Amino acid sequence: MFKSRLDRALASIRQRTDLTADIAVILGSGLGDYAEGLDGVSIPYAEIDGFPQSTAPAHKGVLHIGEHRGQKVVILQGRLHLYEGHSPQDAAFPVEVANALGAKTIILTNVSGSLSPEYSPGDIIAISDHIYLPGLSGQGVLVGRRDADRSPFVNLTKTYDADLLNSANSGPEGPLKRGIYACLAGPHFETPAEGRMLQMLGADMVGMSTVHEAVMARYLDMKVLGLSLIVNPVVTDLETQDLVDEAEIWKVVEDAQPRFAKLLDHILTELY
């Protein structure tokens, strides 16, 4: 079942282009403009057989493949989330497609809420580890996977690649703060009690994406770099914190876009 779907998607892409990629990038909420700088071919997800459709705000749903900063890159402009009604396997399917197009390295970007007093809105954090709550409750991307050539029992001890983290640290942002990313299903934001629970579990930031993709990437033996833009502090105490303002979140994303783009450019030029 999984291979048939991937074969159909790849055949659709191959009707449009024979380009391949070494590196994949998945762009998080509000960061999609970065894909517009790629020199190559753009294919809407709707025109790729078997490819799930992205419905989240600010996720255009377009696959771009070509060259950028001297690298062969496939950029997914728009990701897939459980809260849209997608299965975990749907959410990770773009990673499978990127890998089938040749990508052996993937850069995952997102926006997240901060659980750490050391983070401020606008900080770009390198993900050092994760807590995959949907996966722990039976919604993992590898549930039901039975590929003959690889085991679903993936070792995630070193999910996020140390060399890629070092490349990011030498960029225009300087050494990046690092942290543990907690993945929830959404779409509702966490309550103050849930925020405190996540802090107790050791999470530094929380969002609704990325980890499905990271697990699939490691299943496919891809190197993974995760970058998270902090857009708001998570409310864990109603007495001392203001409620989250959505307009302020999008303003943080808008202001950070140029910095994020420069960091991605630097990382791409450092690879290979």
Image (cartoon, grey):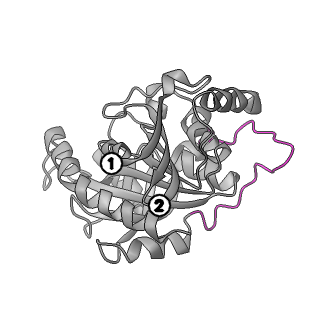
Q: Nearer the viewer, residue 193 or 47?
A: 47
User: What residue is drawn where x is 69% and y is 26%?
Assistant: 8
Q: Position of residue 239 (x, y in %)?
A: 13, 52
Residue placed under numbered mark 2 in the picture: 70
The stretch of residues the image draws in magenta is: 137-159
Q: How many marks?
A: 2
Q: Quadrant of residue 160?
A: bottom right
Residue placed under numbered mark 1 in the picture: 193
**In this rendering, does residue 167 appear at all?**
yes
Q: Position of residue 31 (x, y in %)?
A: 32, 46
First in sequence, mark 1 or 2: give its number: 2
Q: Main secondary structure of the magenta part?
A: loop
Q: Quadrant of residue 29?
A: top left
Side of 253 relative to 142 (left or right): left
Q: Amino acid at mark 1?
A: Ala
**In this rendering, does residue 114 appear at all?**
no
User: What residue is drawn where x is 31% and y is 34%?
Assistant: 58
